Image (cartoon, rainbow, N blue to C red):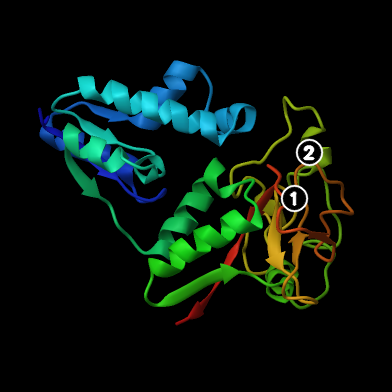
Amino acid sequence: MRRDNIILVGFMGAGKSVCGRLLAHRLGRCFVETDDMIVASEGRSIPEIFREAGEERFRQLEAEALEALKLKSGEIIATGGGLPCREGRMELLRELGTVVWLDGDVRELHARASHIGNRPMLDGRSIGEIDDYLAWLQNSNNSFRPRLCNEFEWERAARGADGREYSHGNVISRGDANYVEAYGKSVATAGPDEIGSHPWSRSPYGIHDMCGNVAEFTQSSLKTEEFVLRGGGYADGPNEIRSSNRQPVSPEFRSLATGLRLCADLK
């Protein structure tokens, strides 16, 4: 039997949570988020689930949450960004009620999701997975072609044209960025921070986290078929997070201490 729920789906950063709360208030309905259901049942955050149990476990928990939604009626439901992407799940969502896709400019959605932080689907990806993500972005936008930045582009964005050692100057202090001296190497304290948590290390162009936090994949400027990590991460020391430091890696390399920053060309 078709229920009268309203289910909001869309890419991360599309505004499902905000729109869902506003809609629930306007219609006098209850509002529920599948991610909140998972956090409540597991007793830990989404990034912790990804970090400690892996993505596959999280997808199993999504399936359990989807099953629990069959008991809901007359509610506003916001799904996680990736929940509808598994085979058969859109059909299950349609059985729950009216499915509404929240669309938006892909560049803005990605920037919004990255700025909010704690988005595990944007962390710890291999080059192969990044390529799949970029292909999806490119097919979703008719004006721009998102791509991985090359090293020259990344370094210019990181330290401008004056050759500074770090994104904000030539000296790094403990509180300037998320690197090993900020929190230490303890698993209880080390890890990525929310984007913009260390504004003192903004680049000359006002870009956050170009040193420390997570090392960023770039296209090698020496060999286009190779990839290089730039900027260093939360477990690296002051030498590794220098703007000039580069760490070549294989396309299969994967780590929770890596991420990416996109460039784009006009189509």
Of badges 2 and 1, the one in the foreground is: 1
Amino acid identity at mark 2: Ala
Query: Which residue carries the number 2 mark?
Result: 182
Check the image and report above or below for 65 versus 88.
above
Check contact, mark 2 vs mark 1: CB within 8 A: yes
Q: Position of residue 266 (x, y in %)?
A: 47, 82
Residue 122 or residue 136, whichever sits in front: 136
**Quarter holding the N terminus?**
top left
| SS state under label 2 | helix
Residue 46 seen in the figure: no
Q: Residue at x 51, y 63 (%)?
A: 134
Residue assigned mark 1: 212
Q: Is residue 56 above or below residue 166?
A: above
Name the spot of residue 83 as percent of width and height, x first.
38, 39
Query: Image height check: is 211 above or below 256?
Result: below
User: In the depicted view, which residue is nearer to us: 34 or 24?
Assistant: 34
- Left or right of 135 in this view: 143: left
